[in-house]
Amino acid sequence: MTQQKLETVFEDWQSNEALAEEMIPLLGTLYRRYNIVTSLFGRSLINQSVIRILKDHRFVKKVEGTELSVRDTFPLVKAMVDLNLGPAHVDVGKLAVAFKHSDENDVTAFLKTELAGIVGGHDVNGNNGEPKDVVLYGFGRIGRILARILIEKAGGGNLLRLRAIVVRGRGDIGKDLEKRASLLRRDSVHGPFAGSITVDEENSALIANGNYIKVIYANSPSEVDYTAYGIDNAIVVDNTGLWRDEEGLGQHLACKGISKALLTAPGKGDVKNIVYGINHEDITGDDRIVSAASCTTNAIVPVLKAVNDHYGIDHGHVETVHAYTNDQNLIDNYHKGDRRGRSAPLNMVLTETGAAKAVAKALPELTGKLTGNAIRVPTPNVSMAILNLNLHQEVDAEEINDYLRRMAIHSSMQKQIDYVDSPEVVSSDFVGNRHAGIVDAKATIADGKHVVLYVWYDNEFGYSCQVVRILQHMSNVSFLVFPKDRD
């Protein structure tokens, strides 16, 4: 490569960096002033670094086959700021590709057509809906990640407000609050909290990025009157897993200030198990107790639905290679579950999973067609589901991969299904992924009517994002999505 070429490549990079730097405050204005959540082919652009924005533009080439740079997206973002838009989710990557392929030369005119439903829709008085109070009952792995997501979303005027967390008493409240704050501030898997956290010991509260979160100490739901803390008509998210049926979870509904309960574990009995993006419309106004199912169920159901809708599934087996969890032992010790008493960081542990049977609760058409098992492995987060399926029709790997790629980009399940086509990815690459599951195209095996699909999932963060989506649905917090898919 000549010296001139080297300089040209570097100058091009610097130019893109400068545009990305200029784009960041515009994205922040859209988010905080207008509640516009921007993304780039499903990758969030909110609170991202310059390098992350440039990498996400490069990602478009990998999944869509289209070159896209900040030179393409910046004019659209800049023009959007001046259109007084109403709240919405806007994929500026898809808009930029559509603009490149259109006959329109005027960016503003193009946006007025594409975003017609929200142009001029901003309410300067802030009357865009009433906020919904949320309480986290339990503050373990899922509870703390839910707190991070809810706090992050509050920055854009999101209508879900984290008002309180409920934990068991730990003696010295001052020390306990500091420990809770520390666990929220630092995470060995997900990294540092994006912002600042202070402790209000006098009032037993945490203040995270301006969100005032009451810490309530109680050993059972019956001990809490939420209205005493100004909390009313709230949804309580039970992260403890102690109660999984209507009778147990009904204890929350008996509390003053609570209107609904959401369980972050598979529900039992008549409790509806919901996988957002698949059967969330089954939630009615009369449903006061709902389950968000399991992380594995959320990971596999969208992919199974996509495959079954297009190819038909005769039968199959789901093998989960799952990160170890807090209910296992660090060293060999007594455990009521088979094999789970053996040291989690030292062993692969064969155990059972109810995910295969749970699929039927979200996809009744697959009832009795799947079996399942699980292997716990010595990694702290990110798991994999191996879907070994027999289909109604023959298919090759390239065809089914292309179909799943399109589903990940252009279908109603684009927030549930992600897609990667790289020979180098490993589990740690998916920490923090917000999708329910990620199809690994390079691992796909197809032979006639038999196909094996490998689906990664962040069993903590990706699952928590699904929980928040259910929370939004139960709270009637919904946004228009742009652009409308053309296929």
Image (cartoon, rainbow, N blue to C red):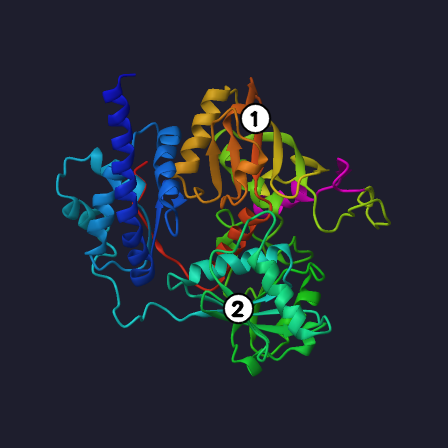
Q: Circle 2 is placed at which residue position?
A: 198
Q: Is residue 345 magenta?
A: yes
Judge whether residue 446 can be spotted in this image. Answer: yes
Q: Circle 1 is placed at which residue position?
A: 391
Q: Are marks 1 and 2 in contact (CB under 8 Å)?
A: no
Q: Position of residue 208 (x, y in %)?
A: 49, 66
Extreme-right residue of the structure: 334
Q: Position of residue 324 (x, y in %)?
A: 70, 43
**Mark 1 or 2, nearer chain start:** 2
Residue at the (57%, 47%) spot, across then down: 362
Q: Is residue 485 magenta?
A: no
Q: Position of residue 39 (x, y in %)?
A: 36, 46
Q: Position of residue 64 (x, y in %)?
A: 36, 30
- In the displayed structure, would residue 9 be above or below residue 346? above
**Quick one: 401 or 138, which is closer to the camera?**
138
**Quick one: 20 or 452, which is closer to the camera?**
20
**Quick one: 360 or 165, which is closer to the camera?**
165
**Quick one: 246 or 422, which is closer to the camera?**
422
Residue stretch rendered in magenta on the structure: 343-363
Give the side of residue 34 with respect to residue 188, left or right: left
Distance from the alpha carbon under mark 1 to that under mark 2: 54 Å
Q: Secondary structure at mark 2?
A: strand
Residue at the (69%, 36%) spot, across then down: 372
Q: Secondary structure at mark 1?
A: strand
- In the displayed structure, would residue 285 be above or below residue 318? below
Q: Name the disc covering residue 268, or none.
A: none
Mark 1: few/some/many CA within 10 Å (<14, 14-19, 20+)? many
Quarter location, residue 67:
top left
| Quadrant including the N terminus | top left
Give the side of residue 425 with respect to residue 60, left or right: right
- In the displayed structure, would residue 262 be above or below residue 368? below
Residue at the (26%, 48%) spot, across then down: 22
